[in-house]
Amino acid sequence: MNLKELSYVEKKGSIDTHDIVVYSLSTCGFCKRAMAFLDEKGISYRYIHVDQLPLETKNEIKKILKEKFNENVAFPFAVIDDASHLVGFIQPDWVRTLELTEDK
């Protein structure tokens, strides 16, 4: 499986400095807050609700992400520029990783 082949939902914002992919669960409060944060900041990103995919696909996504980033997968799991990642939603971490200022 290639993660690029999945059907992501695109959210366009005025800030497009990073390629951000958010793997989330449709029922996850932290996932909703993470995506609301990106929306509020006007940041472009793509997302997919992993819990709405077939179990085999979900397990394959988790396996690929775990192997690539040497990190247990929890949600939200954001991949930035296919090089770094964020697990969970702790706003200061997202601000720092995405090179934002708190007032942006």
Image: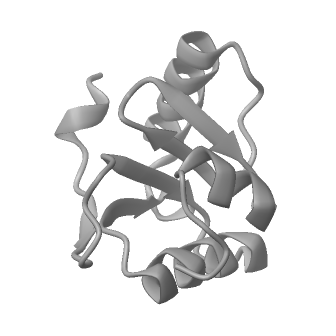
Reply above or below: 36 against 43: below
Taking depth in this image into account, of 64 and 78 the one nearest to the observer is 78
Residue at horizontal 45 percent and vertical 40 percent from the top: 80
Quadrant housing residue 82: top left
Residue in the image at 29% along x and 53% along y? 17
Q: How is the image coloured?
A: one colour
Task: Give the residue displayed 26% in from the left and 24% down from the top.
Answer: 2
* Residue at the spot 44% in from the left edge and 23% down from the top edge: 83
Q: Relative to 51, is 16 on the left or the right?
A: left
Q: Judge left or right: residue 94 versus residue 15.
A: right
Q: Nearer the viewer, residue 54 or 36?
A: 36
Left or right, residue 16 beside residue 28: left
Residue 45 lies, in percent from the top left, at: 33, 62
Give the number of callouts: 0
Q: Quadrant of residue 14?
A: bottom left
Of residue 57 and residue 102, the one placed in the foreground of this image is: 102
Point out residue 41 in the picture as x, y percentages from the top left corner.
Answer: 47, 80
Left or right side of 12 for 67: right
On screen, residue 92 above or below 19:
below
Quadrant position of the N terminus in the picture: top left
